[in-house]
Image (cartoon, helix red, strand yellow):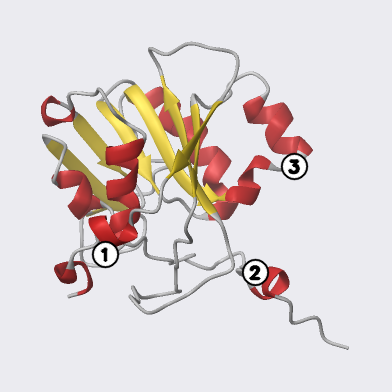
């Protein structure tokens, strides 16, 4: 009998050559800036969004950051066309790197971003990114995130489009590294219900 439970149906099984195009609802990025990255003078900082897609994350970042550089390895008509993992960004060339990377390359994105960012890195990923011995040994053991910021409400993402009416059984969280905050443990942050207050009608135009 086919297993059609929500947990199973929520899994994303993408082919190796897939663009993994799941646009981020803008309110989820505003939640990072309002509830997680606080006490930062973002208006005087630069940010790189290296998997920008159609700009759904870049636009809310521009509401707070003084400068946002957007790029993607696929031409979606927004930002520069660059492969983040191979483009010769200079070390420390941006204050922050903030993105929702392809899940299968998320660890590689983090490793690369930690060199490029002067102040911090924030990655939006499925909550299950916390799991796996490989990621623990290769990433979290020696470089734990400063904050693990779990959404208390779901962040619906649909392949290839932004859909205000979409739903999901998948949990998402922000994994944040603040370079000046050196510690050997991760602080858990709950992102409170905030979609209603942070969502704007023009986000879905």
**Which of the two labelled residues, at mark 3 and mark 2, occupies the earlier sequence position?**
2
Left or right of 130? Residue 106 is: left
What secondary structure is marked by label 1?
A: loop
Q: Which mark is residue 54?
A: 1
Residue displayed at 16% across by 36% down: 65
Residue 119 position (above or below residue 62): above
Where residue 146 appears, x then y in whole percent?
Answer: 49, 24
Residue receiving disc 3: 132
In the structure shown, which secondary structural element does the residue marked by tag 3 occupy? loop
50 or 185, which lies in front?
185
Question: How far apart are the alpha carbons under marks 3 and 2?
Answer: 17 Å
**How would you rate the neighbour count of disc 3 (Cα within 10 Å): few for under 14, some for 14-19, many for 20 or more?**
few
Q: Where in the figure is residue 123, as x and y percent of width and height? A: 44, 42
User: Residue at image x 30%, y 20%?
Assistant: 92
* Closer to the camera in the image, 78 or 35: 35
What residue would you read off at disc 2?
13
The mark nearer the N terminus, 1 or 2, is 2
């Amino acid at each position: 009998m086919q297993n059609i439970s929500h947990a199973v149906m929520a899994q994303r099984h993408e082919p190796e050559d897939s663009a993994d195009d799941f646009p981020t609802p803008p309110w989820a990025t505003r939640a990072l800036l309002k509830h997680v990255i606080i006490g930062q003078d973002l208006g005087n900082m630069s940010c790189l969004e290296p998997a920008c897609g159609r700009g759904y994350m870049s636009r809310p970042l521009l509401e707070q950051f003084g400068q946002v550089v957007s790029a993607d390895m696929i031409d979606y008509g927004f930002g520069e066309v660059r492969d983040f993992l191979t483009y010769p960004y200079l070390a420390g060339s941006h204050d922050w790197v903030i993105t929702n990377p392809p899940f299968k390359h998320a660890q590689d994105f983090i490793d690369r971003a930690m060199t490029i960012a002067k102040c911090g890195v924030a990655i939006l990923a499925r909550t299950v990114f916390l799991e796996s011995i490989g990621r623990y040994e290769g990433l979290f053991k020696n470089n734990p995130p400063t904050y693990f910021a779990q959404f208390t409400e779901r962040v619906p993402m649909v392949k290839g489009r932004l859909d205000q009416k979409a739903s999901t059984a998948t949990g998402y969280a922000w994994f944040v590294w603040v370079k000046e905050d050196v510690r050997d443990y991760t602080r858990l942050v709950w992102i409170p219900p905030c979609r209603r207050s942070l969502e704007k009608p023009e986000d879905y135009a």
